[in-house]
Image (cartoon, rainbow, N blue to C red):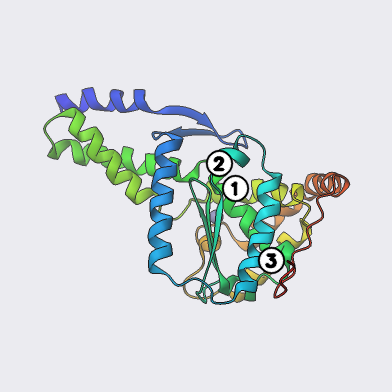
Amino acid sequence: MGRLRVLIPFLLFLTQCATSPLDRRQVVLYSDAEMARQGEQAYSQMQSEMPTTPNSSESVYVQCVADYIIEALAEPMRSSLAWEVTVFDNEQANAFALPGGKIGVYNGLLDVAFNQHQLAAVMAHEVGHVLANHSNERASQSTLRNVGLTAARVLGASDVTIEAIDYGTQLGLFLPFNRTQESEADGIGIILMAEAGFDPEQSIALWENMAAQGGSRPPEFLSTHPSPESRMADLRARLPEARAARAAALDRGMVPDCVPGVINQ
Ligand SMILES: [Zn+2]
């Protein structure tokens, strides 16, 4: 017990107080560089283990949507991360974005996201998780939860910290996001897609398609979210702000022209 009393204040000291883009206070233990390194590592592993789409027009289409979203990002996020998109050959309607700016889209998503605006809604939601540091928060929470157990097993406090941090980081990237994080990613995503020139109303149509599709293994972006009704109500509440953001984007010349199945270049 003596060691725990020393260790826990030490961990809290290491913990940075941060705020999400929507002004929610967060507990984050890890540096951005460490999270980016973990994200890149997990991404390379997925690229080596999962087939990518054999259809180059799918890659061109998804890349086109991603380019508009990335272009709309505020600095330093736009230039400081090595944004990258991979289309995996997988029938699930799913997508993800990892710390470090690594985006994955399963081509099964293209059967549910019917146009560029709907695809942008999903991708901007995923990028929203990255902008709001959700993986760091999630990893930090599992570290803090596990530290008591680990402390009982290990002798030195520095060893405890290292083991707990490794464990938490590994777990963190692959745990589902919680409801607060899902709502936050929705809120960031609808504004981001609109700032990129996509039609924010289509985000609601997309989630309707997703809800109708259902299935026994829901994709990342449905897994822990409140009911589709409450998600859509939240999105509708943000529509006026999102419409204004889109109008401004169109005025600036951000007019996305990504067409499924067509190679534009
Ligand atoms: Zn999500």
Residue in front for this viewpoint, 90 or 242? 90
Q: Could you tell whether 149 is left or right of 182 in the image?
A: left
Q: Residue under label 1, please give it.
A: 128
> In what element is the residue under mark 3?
helix
Q: Nearer the viewer, residue 166 or 22?
A: 166
Q: Tell me if residue 211 can be seen.
A: no
Q: Pointer 1: residues within 10 angstroms few (<14), some, or many (20+)?
A: many
Mark 3 residue type: Leu
The residue sitting at 68% across, 68% down in the picture is 208
Q: Position of residue 17 (x, y in %)?
A: 47, 27
Q: CA distance from mark 1 to mark 3?
A: 17 Å
Residue 245 percent across, percent down from the top left: 80, 45
Residue at the disc numbered 3 = 206
Q: Vertically, is 168 above or below 265?
A: above
Q: Which residue is mark 2?
A: 132
Which is closer to the viewer, label 1 or label 3? 1
Q: CA distance from mark 2 to mark 3?
A: 22 Å
